[in-house]
Amino acid sequence: MRRHRGIDNGLHCVLSIVFGEDRSRARKENAQANLVIVRHLALSPLKRVPSNGGLKGKRKRAGRDDACFLAVLHG
């Protein structure tokens, strides 16, 4: 049980830091659940790209640089 809770807390921490999930203001119907799914889908390719930087930096770099975005997209 502790191991499962640690995994869950670790994932929440990553989503909170990389995507600012705690500051999300989505409150309407299923918006929160839908955004969690989108964030998980976006997190997987970011983790696959080898880089010295963190996930938050990779996300920002992919938003600014087309070559980096394509590298993340193609894994």
Image (cartoon, rainbow, N blue to C red):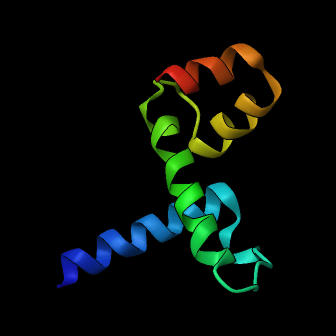
- Estimate the x, y position of residue 26 in percent, counting from the top left: 76, 78
Whether 30 is drawn above or below 65: the answer is: below
Q: Tell me what residue is drawn at x 63 percent, y 80 percent.
A: 30
The outermost residue toward the front is 29
Q: Tell me what residue is drawn at x 75 percent, y 85 percent.
A: 27
Depth check: 55 or 44 in front?
44
Depth check: 32 or 43 in front?
32
Whether 26 is drawn above or below 13: the answer is: below
Whether 36 is drawn above or below 64: the answer is: below
Whether 32 is drawn above or below 17: the answer is: below
- Estimate the x, y position of residue 56 in percent, counting from the top left: 65, 45
Q: Tell me what residue is drawn at x 66 percent, y 69 percent.
A: 21
Q: How many numbered circles does the render carry?
A: 0
Relative placement, left or right, of 28 versus 19 is right
* Quarter the N terminus occupies: bottom left
- Estimate the x, y position of residue 25 in percent, counting from the top left: 80, 79
Relative placement, left or right, of 2 versus 56 is left
Depth check: 40 or 60 in front?
40
To which quarter of the image does residue 22 belong?
bottom right
- Estimate the x, y position of residue 35 in percent, counting from the top left: 63, 65
Relative placement, left or right, of 40 versus 53 is left
The outermost residue toward the top is 67
Q: Tell me what residue is drawn at x 57 percent, y 75 percent.
A: 33
